[in-house]
Image: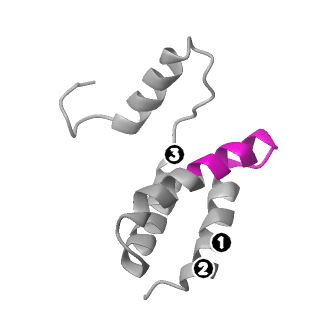
Amino acid sequence: MSDAPGTGDVLGTLAERLNAARGGTGALEPIDLEVRASLLRIARDVAHATERQNAPLAAYIIGRFVQDAMRAGMSQSDAVEQAASMVRSIIGEPPA
């Protein structure tokens, strides 16, 4: 894996390094491709429906929600879908 910006699995590497920074006790799981695509769609929809600066902050809030939901036993994909549903209820359905 290369350390050059924009190459390799940056998100996987970030999760590994953040876990290591906590002495290996972190619970960050890699984000599978389907969940990544869902999160990116949510961020895009928030950016287009509201002020663009809301997109990364919405992603952060959703990440916190997903983490708590997973601790309670929900799957990562179900938690992301629930968050996406909540976002749609706030900003409406994105244009097709």
Secondary structure category for the residue under label 2 = helix
Query: Looking at the image, do the residues carrying marks 2 and 1 touch, with CB atoms under 8 Å apart?
Result: yes
- Determine which residue is flagged by label 2: 90
Q: Which numbered disc, 2 or 3, marks the residue that appears first in the sequence?
A: 3
Q: Can residue 69 be found in the magenta stretch?
A: yes
Residue 65 at x, y percent in the picture: 66, 52
Tell me if residue 86 comes above or below residue 4 in the rendering. Answer: below
Residue lying at 68% horizontally and 56% vertically, measured from the top left: 79
Q: CA distance from mark 2 to mark 3?
A: 26 Å
Viewer-proximal residue among 28 and 37:
28
Residue matched to label 1: 86
Circle 3 residue: 32
Rendering quarter of residue 24? top right
Residue at (81% x, 43% y) in the render: 72
Residue 86 pos. (x, y %): 65, 72
Q: Quadrant of the C terminus?
A: bottom left
Numbered disc 3: secondary structure:
loop
Going by the numbered disc 2, the residue's amino acid type is Ile
Give the CA distance from mark 2 to mark 1. Answer: 6 Å
- The Cα atoms of the two marked residues, 1 and 3, are separated by 21 Å
